[in-house]
Amino acid sequence: MAVTVERAVLDQAEDIVQMHWDAEDWLRAREIDPPARGDVSLADVREQIELGQWQVALFAGIVVGALRVLRSDPEVWIEDGVPATYVARIMTDRKHASAGLGAQLLRLVDDQARAENASVVRLECVETNVRLRDYYEQQGFFRVGRRDFEVDWPSVLLMEKVVR
């Protein structure tokens, strides 16, 4: 699938939030635990877009994927001095999920990490979501830890991939 990926603009915030809600509905319908970070509000996404944290994948002008990339992620990761790029959220429209879009977005993050001189790309995965964990491992990520939270988030596996 030929998509373009660009920095998200405020007009795309509703598309991002709706894609998140659709993904959570899809997960619940299959009795798979939703992402650890829970609800995504329109106000939060707008603020994050203004901070330049969201990118969208467009196919024929329609948002079919989105990712939130950070230079640090203290909500989940403990600072360890390793130069890293963090994938705080990645999602694809379910109609385009099997087209390799997720892998394409993750390769884009690898390129961004290299450009920023990061040595690893990091993300977290809900511990009980074996299917997603296996997918990330197929994309070159490996487990480096586990994190429990005091807030109402499920435990997550911490995963990273070395950027070459």
Image (tube, rainbow, N blue to C red):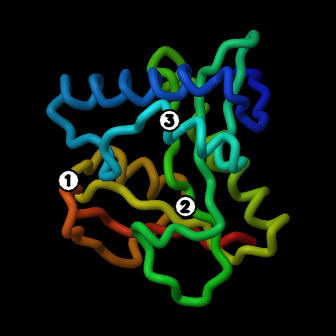
Element carrying mark 3: helix
Q: Is 131 above or below relative to 84? A: above
How far, Cα to Cα, is label 2 from label 3? Answer: 33 Å
Contact flag, marks 2 and 3 (Cβ < 8 Å): no
Q: Quadrant of residue 120?
A: bottom right
Is 48 positioned to the left or the right of 73 in the image?
right
How far, Cα to Cα, is label 2 from label 1? Answer: 19 Å
Q: Is 102 above or below relative to 148? A: above
- The disc at residue 43 is 3
Comparing labels 2 and 3, the label whose residue is closer to the camera: 3
Label 2 neighbour load within 10 Å: few <14, some 14-19, many 20+: few
Is 31 positioned to the left or the right of 78 in the image?
left
Dot 2 corresponds to which residue? Answer: 140
Dot 1 corresponds to which residue? Answer: 128
Q: Is 98 above or below relative to 153? A: above
x then y, percent, for residue 75: 41, 67
Is 38 positioned to the left or the right of 48 in the image?
left
Element carrying mark 1: loop
Q: Is 4 above or below relative to 138? A: above
Q: Earlier in the sequence, mark 1 or mark 3?
A: 3
Q: Earlier in the sequence, mark 2 or mark 3?
A: 3
Q: Residue at x 37, y 52 (%)?
A: 134
x then y, percent, for residue 143: 39, 71
x then y, percent, for residue 95: 48, 15
Give, as a three-letter code, the residue at label 2. Answer: Gly
Q: Residue at x 59, y 47 (%)?
A: 68
Give, as a three-letter code, the residue at label 3. Answer: Ala
Residue at the right extreme, as displayed: 115
Residue at the bottom extreme, as displayed: 81
User: Which corner quadrant holds the C terminus?
Assistant: bottom right
Q: Residue at x 40, y 38 (%)?
A: 40
